[in-house]
Amino acid sequence: MKRRLLKLLKIIGFTLLVLLVGLIILIFFTGPKLPDNTDAIIENALSSDIPELVKGKSGYVISDNHKIWYESITPNDTNKGAILLFMGISNDALGWPQKFLDRLVENGYQVIRYDYRGTGLSDWFENWENKPYSLSDLAKDAKIILDTLQIKKANLVGVSLGGMVAQQFAIDHTDRTMTLTSIMSSGNIIDKEIPEISKSIVFDLVRIGIKYSIIPNERNTIKLHLAARVILRGDADYDIDVKSISEQVLYNLRKRRGYNLNASGQHHEATYRSGSRYDKLKELKLPVLIIHGINDPFIPIDHSKKLATIIPDSKTKWFKNMGHDFPENLIDSISNEIILNIERE
């Protein structure tokens, strides 16, 4: 009996060892290939001065007793109106490409971006589970920023989760909304009639999160962000700006608060708790632009296609060779589409 038990324990132990070795190989020796010369570019960024990434007027508002950080960038001459930006899940305001901000400002628009609750310089939450927030709460934070800046109405632009927050803003604060642009987003992320968010992409993102967080230094944090961009690019084929991403990550780590590992779960919960916006979106009476990448591996384009059938006065733009990302080579085209939507208001 003892021999059988000992043999069984040996088999179990060997099996667990094989599984552990397999898991280690899966996590540390597989994963997306980073762009060429990544190491050299990162080393150069680590040893160079970090450029200033906050160039406008920045400050804080108080929303539900929480501090919310924002930045407002105004054009040098004519101000054609305000564009309020909503970033994706767990990302702070610095996630917007500098080239994109510059294009909007150069075209005469005041650009406002802000850190969601739980990100950047806005308040983080230790006991978030006791009082989780919703998409409406994130939208309310943005509305208070407009109040503080004395802006009556704004053009909304949101990407991924930000598209959902922008939609909620347009629903909750229609009188403060001029136009809406929803980029690679959804009106109901749990709609069972269309393909769901890719579980394999979620698994890949978790896997690289483990891989690069075991030793959480600056170099590995940069590689984590680069690997995520490669995964979200899917089968689209375009270059990833390693230098700009490295500088953005280092700016966050050295000049701000870094990255909140709990933000993704909080924003995920806010999204699912908020449910469907379909019925309310049908009532919108304003110019709406819906953008999506044909190659998006994360949120299927079917979500945006369904939005287009629901929202009145909506126009669409499907970009070839675009994943769940903001490719640098498409920034001019995306900016132009947004401006055209604003100008048809």
Image (cartoon, helix red, strand yellow):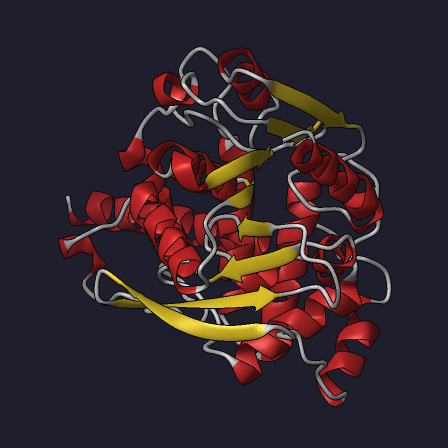
Residue 321, placed above or below residue 18: above
Residue 290, placed above or below residue 279: below
Q: Residue at x 71, y 64 (%)?
A: 75
In this view, the residue in front, 341 or 245, is 341
Classify residue 294 as left or right of residue 65.
right
* Quadrant in the rendering for residue 281: top left
Q: Residue at x 75, y 80 (%)?
A: 45
Classify residue 314 as left or right of residue 193.
right
In this view, the residue in front, 272 or 137, is 137
* Quadrant in the rendering for residue 201: top right
* Quadrant in the rendering for residue 150: bottom left
* Quarter the N terminus occupies: top left
Q: Residue at x 75, y 75 (%)?
A: 42
From the top left corner, tell me how far across and down residue 28 is, in percent: 59, 59
From the top left corner, tell me how far across and down residue 215 is, in percent: 52, 75
From the top left corner, tell me how far across and down residue 152 is, in percent: 45, 49
From the top left corner, tell me how far across and down residue 60 is, in percent: 39, 72
Residue 9, placed above or below residue 290: below
**Residue 231 showing in the rendered view:** yes
Q: Residue at x 37, y 43 (%)?
A: 268
* Quarter the C terminus occupies: top right
Extreme front residue here?
78
Residue 92, placed above or below residue 344: below
